[in-house]
Amino acid sequence: MKRNLLRNAGQAACLLLAACAGLAASASMPEADEVYEEPVYVFEQTRAQEEYPAGGGTVGARYSCQLLMLTVSNQDRLSPEDGTAAAQAAENFNSKMHSLMIDAVGAGKTMSELAEEVESAAGAYYDETEAGYVQNGQIVSVRVDNISYTGGAHPNSHAFSYLFDMEKGTFVDPSEIADDPELLRATVTDLILDQINGMDQEMRDGLFENYPSVVSQWNNHCVELREEGLLVTFSAYDIGPYAMGALGFDIPYTSITGALGEGGADRLLGAPAEK
């Protein structure tokens, strides 16, 4: 009996030592770090459209609006910090696009009243909005073009833009891509005015008298940050009459390197890509 007790006690001691050794071994082995991914952003189209009948079964008026929405394709594989930032960036972008869509649809629905006046499909009223984007480095340039006809001699068109900083997750003013926004604004203004001065006299004479003041606020108009430089577009009636149409001015990055500053150049020229 005494021998059995000793044997059992010995076995228990061995089991206890083995268990302790296992615990010690597992405690000494570090857990593998969880592997996270970088956010993968995807721009998708979203659309709303409707047609309104006129007499005789023809379409008297129509509207369409195609904008963009931002999604994160690998949201569930991001670190908690990156996941929160990516989700907030998508929300900021989509909130602006949603607001634009509401405005466009609201304006489009008012055309239902005009449809009754239309006598043939050739005279149909319309309002069309379409968005596209270009990405250069961390800055996404969203250009929105609108063209509408609600009667009169010709349709009206307008281009405007929104710049989205993917790193900050917010929309930014075009001048804010530079380290010194005011320096960039003044530099681009001078370059546009130089191009206008290079136009033929008849073209210059056709511009509105206040065009220098409007040009100085180029950052409030349509600005796209393309692969080789800025494209600043003034829509018809911005600095000249309808007959002149939209006027675009290319500003190469090489001509504004000093105004961009080191940070601005890094933000823009890191990884240019056009979609």
Image: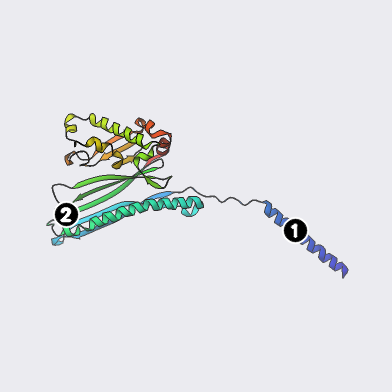
> What residue sits 44% from the left and 53% below the top?
87
Pointer 2: what residue? 124
In the picture, measured across the screen, residue 204 lies left or right of residue 42, that is left
Note whether residue 161 is visible.
Answer: yes
In the picture, measured across the screen, residue 30 lies left or right of residue 224, that is right
On the image, which quarter does residue 271 sit in?
top left
Work out whether 142 lies above or below 227: below
Q: Secondary structure at mark 1?
A: helix
Q: Amino acid at mark 2?
A: Ala
Task: Give coordinates of residue 88: x percent, y percent.
Answer: 43, 52
Q: CA distance from mark 1 to mark 2?
A: 87 Å
Please tell me which residue lies in front, 63 or 92: 92
Q: Amino acid at mark 1?
A: Ala
In the picture, measured across the screen, residue 209 lies left or right of residue 39, that is left
- In which quadrant is the N terminus drawn? bottom right
Tell me the tag on residue 141.
none
- In which quadrant is the C terminus drawn? top left
Task: Give coordinates of residue 89: x percent, y percent.
Answer: 41, 50
Task: Give coordinates of residue 80: x percent, y percent.
Answer: 51, 53
> What residue sits 88% from the left and 68% below the top?
2
